[in-house]
Amino acid sequence: MAAYKLNPDHWVDLYADYLFNYAIARVSDAEIAKDLVQETFFAGLKSAKNYKGDAAERTWLIAILKRKVIDHYRKINSNKGKAEVRINYNTSSESEGDWLEEQVADPFSKDGDNTIENEELGLAIEDCISKLPKKQSLVFKMKTIQGMSTEDICNELGINPSNLWVMIHRARTALMGCMNQTWF
Amino acid sequence: MQLNVYLLFSKECAEFSSKNKKLTSLCERAGLDTLSEDDKDDMKKKLKKHL
């Protein structure tokens, strides 16, 4: 049976931001999320021979990242972690038992729903961005997500402002079309 | 001047502008993050070593 071809040379360009957003929504720490993405790529390389092509490359990498996130929480919830939580337990009479409330999600809170919806929205936008031509997606991310100035982007990419705005216009038009199909 | 009047009354421009605002607000709501180019270069280097 022919092995399905993975393309690790392009993983960072194609999937790093998508995986990073997935991870940061779950660990709420940019450094940890970055490490998890890197580990995911390494694990992907290691198990590349097991890739059968049943799922798209990105879906396969997300499945690996999910395991990495679980491993991360297992590690911090080890015995050492539990001991640290106990030390931090507040025993003063005024706030006794507060830590329990801090740990348990409020079932009447809408924040959880909003967080999930925003996370799904983020992944949907990332998905649409990944379908853009490389330069358009780069320009859109630099301008809209990273909030870089027009001048800085032009200097970095060696383009003039007119080129930049044409690319942003095309990127936004394509993104709106994609979001209309996938989100609304 | 002619362009400004056109932009003010054009239906297509108004539609595009409203969609544009919607997209911007969606991006803000989603709180998207990206890795810096330096981080990505670093990742690429480390990956290359493992290839």
Image (tube, rainbow, N blue to C red):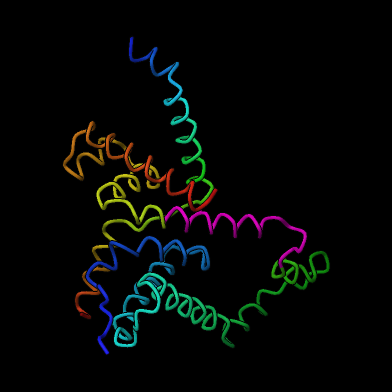
Position of A135 with respect to A62 (left or right) is: left
Residue A44 on the magenta segment: no
Identify which residue is drawn at 54% across, 83% down: A74
Question: Which residues are the magenta region?
Answer: A105-126
Q: Between A135 and A41, which is closer to the camera in this rendering?
A: A135
Q: Residue furthest bottom?
A: A1
| In the depicted structure, whether residue A149 falls above or below residue A179 | above
User: For this view, does A57 lie left or right of residue A118?
Assistant: left
Kindly indicate the quadrant of the structure image that contains residue A165. top left
Rendered location of residue B31, percent (x, y): 49, 51
Which residue is most to the front? A1
How far across and down, in percent of the image, does residue A109 sit?
73, 57
- As displayed, is residue A154 above or below residue A84? above
The N terminus of chain A sits in image quarter? bottom left
**Image location (x, y in percent) of residue A154:** 22, 39
Q: Quadrant of residue A39?
A: bottom left
